[in-house]
Amino acid sequence: MTTRLASFVSLKQRRLQQGFKLFEFGVVAAVLAIMATILLQRLWFYQDRAEEVAVQQVVANVSAALKIKVAQGRLPGQMVDLTILLQQNPLNWLTEKPANYLGELSAPSDLEVTSGNWYFDLHDHYLVYLLNKRDSFGGAQLKRLKFKVKLLRLPKNPVKPTGATEPDGVAFEQVSS
């Protein structure tokens, strides 16, 4: 009788366990789906931040190279015409170009340039980065980030003491298109 009662209890437990298997599976699937969604959102966030940092790094490298060019022009016996720097491709000043640099293009169409790449526009003399996503960089509405070497024309100060140093006279800045 005890074996019969034990088999009845174990049969009842098996049926109860089988009923909960589907429910448990549903709960586990829902939890996994929520965790996967959170993980994907974080991955997209970090991809956007990585793109932003990579662009900032290239801009910082070009700015440093520009300062070096200007400093070399101030050496004794050297002279750099700052207006020539306005026409040059700034990435040519770097010892190593970014891996996603497509080269010098003359007014390329959207089909010629894929997102996530740099190119130098020969027509307008802009260094251009095509964003992977439009909502990167704090909700920027631009699809293309354009950078250019600008000549700073500061007014002459008549009160300036003789022998005071002049500002660099050039800057590498993002421009609005």
Image (cartoon, helix red, strand yellow):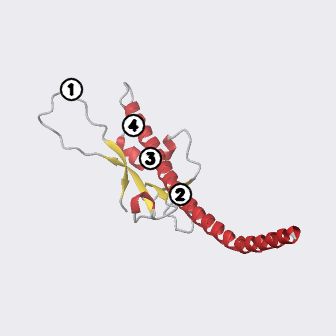
Asked which quadrant contains residue 28, the reply is bottom right
Q: Secondary structure at mark 1?
A: loop
Which dot marks residue 59? 3
Q: Nearer the viewer, residue 15 or 51?
A: 15
Question: Is the residue 33 above or below the residue 161 in the image?
Answer: below
Q: Nearer the viewer, residue 136 or 171?
A: 136
| Place of residue 156 in the rendered image (x, y in percent of width and height, measured from the top left) | 17, 40
- Foreground mark, 4 or 3, reads 3
Which kind of residue does numbered mark 4 sit on?
Lys
For image coordinates 45% across by 48% down, the residue present is: 56
- Foreground mark, 1 or 3, reads 3
- Foreground mark, 4 or 2, reads 2
Q: CA distance from mark 4 to mark 1?
A: 21 Å
Which kind of residue does numbered mark 2 sit on?
Arg
Label 4 crowd bin: few (<14), some (14–19), many (20+), radius 10 Å: some
Which dot marks residue 42? 2
**Residue where numbered disc 4 is placed:** 67
Which dot marks residue 126? none
- Foreground mark, 4 or 1, reads 4
Label 3 crowd bin: few (<14), some (14–19), many (20+), radius 10 Å: some
Q: Earlier in the sequence, mark 4 or mark 3?
A: 3
Q: Secondary structure at mark 4?
A: helix
